[in-house]
Image (cartoon, rainbow, N blue to C red):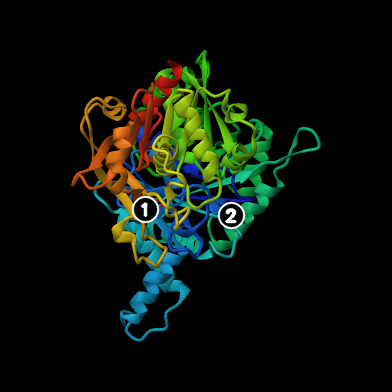
């Protein structure tokens, strides 16, 4: 029998459900089980691709080009779960499928309703992943907070799954908040209410993870257990961590979360292997030196916009045994500062991440010029590579006003322009150049020495491209092209001649980095910072 775990959240949002679900995945894998992860987002967007980062943070891209919620990134970093379009479910996508079926006449004259048609569709998508022969346990994270109108059909589906497959095959793990008031008094009432809400829908949680400033006392756990019908040993503390989130699975492991889950699911208690993770976390916590990287972007006031890049830099720190401090610099502030030195002087290296639209671009150009002239290591990702091209064209080739046609359609020197296949595209959803493709790296370049081999596979998410008309003049002036697509038609990476370390990539290396396997490009970048 295949096993399922539904992870829900109560009291308020942003409690770290994604990390909790992913940590549980880590622990079950550490005991030799094969885990698949699914994220449910109860919004009506078909995918996250059309949303601004201000809505839900970074858009995470899978190999098959799905534009998903950033929690899939957490799953990728914490587990080996295969991740594709099918691992991300939204209300919009479910309704679109059901409505398409209705138009095709597939419901044979029936009235199409939320129950059973919507819930059946949700169930079939979950079971399609869960019944795969490569999967033992499927963890389904239900986005939003219990009590939200939007999540009701998903919770109803979870209830049906528990009822149909039995409690020994389907578990409910609920993450709640135990807030602290007047000094350090911890309050259990919101947790009691949140469980009450869940039980009204017909779900009795099996395990409670209580997010709190400090560990819950035995008496507090007993109180919660009493009010919620959860065994006291299944009421766990989810305490805040300050150095690294990779410590979270270890904290749950100390409280025997994995053991409790396996027992409840009637699965064999195989030995846990968490030494690798413990060593890595300890190594990072004890690292003696720190490198400082300035990340110059336009959404810096938001915590989760560049989530995968932040994490990839930390992984690279782990790989190089240094702490990484990321200074988020607002590109627009840079435009207003007297000199770039003022804001960037304290950094060992500069990174310009991906982005869309005109705002902040001039500040990014200044940052790239500064990195090139001050000979500081530079990593440009997607837009960050395009800025490298624009900056070089303007300041080295003296092509005044050189730009991307995304920023200025009338630029006299369109050094970055729309892909031919993108001309005439009017629909926004899922129409960029998306997903995994091959890059052929050239010998004697930073990118080749980082990866160590010629052909690399990375994910894309962009519309604009290095304009080949400017290739020769830029190359002659010293902007090296270090990688191409397999057909040799598109530029995938660039670097500066005679500069200690620089690489701009049109793709997104950040999506595949793991703490246990830092991405080679980030690793090389951080190594260059140490130098
Ligand atoms: N806006 C740029 C493009 O569409 C870069 C996209 C990105 O950085 N992801 O090509």
Q: Nearer the viewer, residue 327 or 491?
A: 491
Q: Nearer the viewer, residue 119 or 305?
A: 305
Q: Quadrant of residue 35?
A: top left
Residue 499: percent from the left, percent from the top? 38, 23
Q: Quadrant of residue 34?
A: top left
Of helix, strand and loop, which one carries label 2?
loop
Of labels 1 and 2, earlier in sequence is 2
Q: Residue at x 38, y 84 (%)?
A: 110
Q: Is residue 257 above or below residue 41?
A: above
Q: Residue at x 40, y 26 (%)?
A: 525
Q: Is residue 185 left or right of residue 320?
A: right
Residue 520: percent from the left, percent from the top? 33, 28
Residue bearing mark 1: 417
Q: Residue furthest top?
A: 288
Q: Nearer the viewer, residue 229 or 322?
A: 322
Position of the C terminus, as image quadrant, is top left
Q: Residue at x 38, y 73 (%)?
A: 98
The answer as to whether callout 2 falls within 8 Å of ligand 1 is: no
Residue bearing mark 2: 145
Q: Residue at x 29, y 60 (%)?
A: 421
The answer as to whether callout 1 falls within 8 Å of ligand 1 is: no
Residue 8: percent from the left, percent from the top? 53, 51
* Label 1 crowd (10 A; few <14 / some 14-19 / many >=20): many
* Label 2 crowd (10 A; few <14 / some 14-19 / many >=20): many
Alpha carbon separation for disc pair 1 and 2: 42 Å
Q: Is residue 380 visible?
A: yes
Q: How many marks?
A: 2
Q: Residue furthest right?
A: 182
């Amino acid at each position: 029998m295949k096993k399922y775990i539904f992870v829900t959240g109560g009291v308020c949002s942003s409690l770290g459900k994604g990390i909790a679900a992913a940590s549980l995945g880590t622990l079950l894998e550490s005991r030799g089980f094969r885990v698949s992860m699914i994220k449910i987002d109860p919004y009506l967007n078909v995918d996250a691709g059309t949303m601004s980062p201000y809505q839900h943070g970074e858009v995470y891209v899978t190999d098959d080009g799905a534009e998903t919620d950033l929690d899939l990134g957490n799953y990728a970093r914490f587990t080996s779960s295969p991740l594709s379009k099918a691992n991300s479910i939204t209300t919009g996508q479910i309704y679109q499928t059901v409505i398409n079926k209705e138009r095709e006449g597939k419901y044979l004259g029936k009235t199409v309703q939320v129950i059973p048609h919507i819930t059946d569709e949700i169930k079939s998508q979950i079971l399609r992943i869960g019944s795969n022969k490569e999967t033992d346990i499927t963890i389904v994270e239900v986005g939003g907070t219990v009590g939200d109108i939007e999540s009701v059909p998903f919770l109803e589906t979870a209830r049906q799954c528990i009822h149909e497959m039995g409690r020994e095959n389907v578990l409910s793990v609920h993450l709640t908040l135990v807030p602290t008031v007047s000094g350090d008094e911890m309050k259990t009432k919101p947790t009691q209410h949140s469980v009450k809400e869940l039980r009204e829908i017909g779900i009795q949680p099996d395990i409670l993870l209580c997010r709190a400033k400090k560990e819950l006392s035995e008496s507090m756990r007993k109180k919660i257990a009493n009010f919620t019908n959860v065994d006291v040993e299944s009421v766990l503390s989810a305490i805040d961590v300050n150095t690294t989130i990779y410590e979270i699975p270890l904290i749950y492991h100390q409280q025997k979360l994995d053991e409790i889950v396996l027992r409840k699911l009637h699965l064999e208690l195989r030995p846990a292997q968490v030494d690798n993770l413990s060593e890595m976390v300890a190594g990072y916590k004890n690292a003696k030196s720190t490198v400082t990287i300035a990340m110059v972007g336009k959404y810096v006031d938001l915590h989760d916009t560049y989530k995968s890049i932040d994490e990839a830099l930390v992984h690279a720190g782990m790989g190089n045994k240094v702490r990484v401090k990321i200074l988020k610099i607002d590109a627009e502030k840079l435009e207003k500062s007297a000199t770039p030195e003022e804001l960037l002087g304290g950094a060992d290296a500069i990174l310009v991440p991906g982005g869309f639209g005109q705002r902040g671009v001039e500040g990014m150009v200044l940052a790239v010029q500064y990195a090139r002239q001050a000979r500081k290591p530079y990593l440009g990702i997607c837009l960050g590579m395009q800025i490298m091209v624009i900056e070089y064209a303007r300041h080295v080739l003296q092509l005044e006003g050189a730009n991307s046609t995304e920023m200025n359609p009338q630029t006299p020197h369109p050094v970055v322009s729309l892909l031919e296949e993108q001309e005439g595209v009017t629909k926004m959803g899922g129409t960029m150049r998306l997903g995994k493709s091959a890059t052929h790296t050239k010998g004697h370049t930073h990118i080749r020495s980082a990866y160590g081999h010629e052909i690399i596979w990375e994910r894309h998410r962009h519309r604009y491209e290095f304009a080949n008309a400017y290739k020769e003049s830029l190359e002659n002036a010293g902007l090296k092209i270090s990688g191409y697509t397999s057909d040799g038609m598109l530029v995938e990476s660039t670097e500066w001649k005679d500069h200690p370390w620089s690489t701009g990539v049109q793709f997104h290396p950040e999506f595949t980095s793991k703490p246990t396997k830092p991405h080679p490009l980030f690793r090389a970048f951080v190594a260059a910072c140490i130098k």
